[in-house]
Amino acid sequence: MSKQKTVIIFALIIAFGFSAGCTGVSRGIGKVTANKYAEPRSGTVWAVPPPQLEPPHPDDKNVYISFRNISDAQSVDLTDELRNAAREQGWTIVSNPQEATYRLRASLRFFGEVKPESGGAHIARSMGVISGAAVGVGTGALVANATDSWAAGAATGIGAGGLVGAGIANASKPREWAMIIDFVLEEYNEQPIEYQMMRDTGATTRDSAGTGNTRMAAGGGTRGSNTSSGRMTKSSNYFPHGVRLSAWANQMNMKQEEAMPYLRERTEKVVTQMLPQ
């Protein structure tokens, strides 16, 4: 490290002191030393990518969007973000799922801290099948992990005193948060399609996909039959594509509340990559 940079770093420590907190000092130092974790970073990883669907007719650009939270972070609700993103693309949001040409059902599976630079990929891969989606479609997709090492840009070797040095060292460590969401994108077809899906615990062999739906009166109901392999063969006018997304954000000593706005923004943006254009 050059003498000039060293002088600047100590000047920052004196200027900020404890009043700004070790996190603020560390991030300020990180900007001087070009540490990539000084500023917040975010991105997305497709554990199971969205399907490539044919563009819909303008009259068919209607979608039903639902969201449920089955993670430990019960306060998180992404319904508005998902629906607003679809509207901005020119989609009409319908309140009755039986009248939709497309149905996008989102389930938040996980929200928490993960290993830096992992993007939540390991957790996403370990979650098994996407409930409610057809199996064998896109489930073999792998995730590309980032290869950069956070330590390469970290500020080290600053002798600024025991407690201050330890505090800055801890505050300089990157923390990464991930939000893993399973999507089931259902596409309407004129003729029923038969497919297989994993059997849910306690699930019945019939759902309400076609109940009261005039468009599906001639066979729109969904039937199911159990098999010895633990799968269920189903037939429906809606074919369920499974998609799994991990949205991530990291920064020096990033707190959960700091990560949330970036994760929400990233999740909202991916709607443009799931709904056909």
Image (cartoon, grey):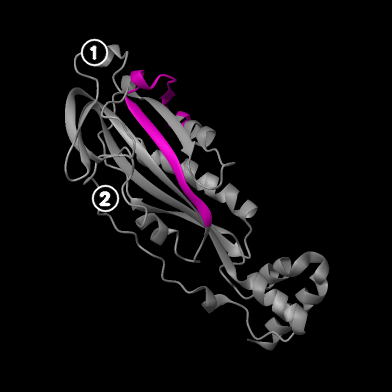
Seen at 31% across and 32% down, the residue is 186
Whether residue 276 is visible here, answered yes or no, is no
In front of the other: 205 or 240: 205
Seen at 28% across and 35% down, the residue is 240
Q: Quadrant of the C terminus?
A: top left
Kind of residue sitting beneath label 2: Thr
Q: Quadrant of the N terminus?
A: bottom right
Indicate whether 96 appears above or below 266: above
Residue 100 within the segment the image draws in magenta: yes
The residue labelled by disc 1 is 217
**Which image quadrant for residue 237?**
top left
Q: Tell me whether the residue at label 1 lies in contact with that at label 2, contact meaning CB atoms closer than 8 angstroms.
A: no
Kind of residue sitting beneath label 1: Ala
Residue 155, given in percent of the width and then of the height, sits at 62, 79
Seen at 27% across and 54% down, the residue is 141
Residue 220 within the segment the image draws in magenta: no
Whether residue 230 is visible here, answered yes or no, is yes
Could you classify mark 2 by the number of other residues whose Cα lies within 10 Å: few (under 14), some (14-19), or many (20 or more)? some
Q: Which residues are magenta?
A: 87-112
Question: Label for residue 139?
Answer: 2
Q: Secondary structure at mark 1?
A: loop
Q: Is residue 216 left or right of residue 3?
A: left
